[in-house]
Amino acid sequence: MLLDYNTNTPRRFWNPADFFKPQFEKIKARAHKRNLKPLFGIEIEYNVKPGQFIAYNLNGFTKKMAIIKTDGSLRHNGVEICSRPMPRRVHKVGWKRMFDKIQAKEIPIAAGRTTGLHIHYSLDYLTKNLRGGHTVINSFLEDAARFMKHNYRFFTLCAERPYNCYCVYGDSIRNRYNSINLRSETVEFRIFKSPRTYDSLMKSIELVDSFMDFNLKRAFNVAGEASLAEFLQYINQNSDNFPYLVRFLRKNRPKIKNILENP
């Protein structure tokens, strides 16, 4: 099923995997270039109050960029906004107008226990840049899942969402509710609260980008398990590339200091 992003009328039975897959399949054919960037597909879930319909209010901001659909886990006329796979720089430009309207309360949304932000990272980029490619993908992602499990206090802080049944910090990358899990064309991160602000969305995408890049660089150069202090040092050394994440970490410096001192 090829997706037409110009007709993003809400429909109940659209599965994100159905429209992520053909897009990512086309991406597989990209030539491997030195400056190739990973792509990110995102799913944002929102609840709304009884009697309100916000899907059509979002159409003008998501047209050609995302599909709006309903989901059984959402209340009343809740919506799930599912983007096409895009580079981080395109997400940075594309979502600003919508979140300006949300912050101005012109589009009323609610985020609760059952709503979340899921970020899909392109599997093709990972396999093209990982020594061993598909043959080592499982062990690479299992190591990443263990790192998140061991440092779940840091990741729940950054995700602004507590551990719950919709987001499990475990070792199994085949469990669809695991914090990080392997899908047919993507690596999915399920840890994030549905963002109410543009800065929160960008911080979340930057966390995924920095975490995967950190693990890729370690896979090439370093043996043994990584530490949270090493990951934070990597972010600090590349702060210009992750401005929204760095701003969040600096704002929460006392909490991060406590996590490091009391693992």
Image (cartoon, rainbow, N blue to C red):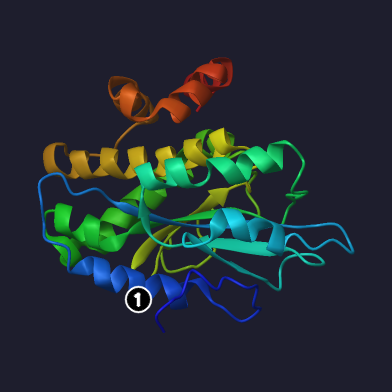
Q: Residue at x 34, y 31 (%)?
A: 227
> Does residue 165 appear in the picture of this structure?
no
> Does residue 256 appear in the picture of this structure?
yes
Q: Secondary structure under badge 1? A: helix
Q: Nearer the viewer, residue 223 or 48?
A: 48
Left or right side of 133 for 38: right
Query: Image quadrant for the N terminus?
Result: bottom left
Please say if 78 is above or below 22. above
Q: Residue at x 62, y 37 (%)?
A: 197
The residue beneath circle 1 is 22
- Rendered location of residue 53, percent (x, y): 79, 63
- Rendered location of residue 94, percent (x, y): 47, 47
Q: Residue at x 44, y 42 (%)?
A: 93
Q: Quadrant of residue 78?
A: bottom right
- Rendered location of residue 221, percent (x, y): 12, 37
Please say if 237 is above or below 210. above
Residue type at mark 1: give it. Answer: Pro
Q: Quadrant of residue 172?
A: bottom left
Q: Residue at x 11, y 59 (%)?
A: 132
Q: Nearer the viewer, residue 42 or 219?
A: 42
- Rendered location of residue 33, percent (x, y): 10, 51
Left or right side of 240 for 3: right
